[in-house]
Image: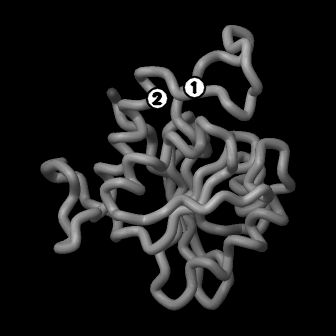
Amino acid sequence: MYLVRHCHAQAREAWAGSDEERPLTERGTREAKAIADRFETGADGTPSRDLGAVPLEPRPTSLMSSSAERCLATLRPLSAACGLEIATAEFLAEGSDPGEVLTRLKDSSTGGRVPVVCTHGDVIWGIVQLLEKAGVRLAGPLDVRKGSIWVIETVSGSVKSARYIPPAKV
């Protein structure tokens, strides 16, 4: 499964509306497009553009997100490229219990399914800490930068390893 931290959004203190409705910045929009470019998205397994030597991640089979606009906007380019709808899940909201999120997501990646899930930094950081405490092999820095991805490898519902993909330089 792929855990995506939402891309750069308008600053909380500069946004007058509801935090749930806070949109991506121009940089965040470019980061979201770069996330879509990391995956095989075409019917023939091709990306939306050539990334050269960067290996592509497999085509997603489902997209799930926190209902926050910044999370939904992060997955929209991938949704458009793959032709997949984005399901929302309240258990992915900011402040959610990382253990509960991990438990609910583990089974979503069995049987060849490739879910891509967008949530918030606190949730992903909590999941990474849980995996580290459990002795799961973590490749890459322990980081959760905006627009980054954690690839969680599971076998029969158990997490075997995880690797960090830093955000694209856009």
In this rendered view, identify the residue nearer to me: 62 or 158: 62
Residue situated furthest top in the rendering: 14
Residue 45 vs residue 2, the one in the foreground: 45
Residue 9 is tagged as 1
Q: Quadrant of the N terminus?
A: bottom right
Q: Residues within 10 Å of mark 1 (few under 14, many from 20)?
A: many
Q: Amino acid at mark 2?
A: Gly
Label 2 residue SS: helix
67 with respect to 51 (left or right): right
| Quadrant holding the C terminus | top left
Q: Residues within 10 Å of mark 2 (few under 14, many from 20)?
A: many
User: Circle 1 — which element?
Assistant: loop
Residue under pointer 2:
28
* Badge 2 or badge 1: first in the primary sequence: 1
Cα distance in 3D space between marks 2 and 1:
6 Å
Q: Is residue 126 above or below residue 2?
A: above
Contact (CB < 8 A) between labels 2 and 1?
yes
From the viewer's perspective, tell me whether residue 62 is left or right of residue 54. Answer: right
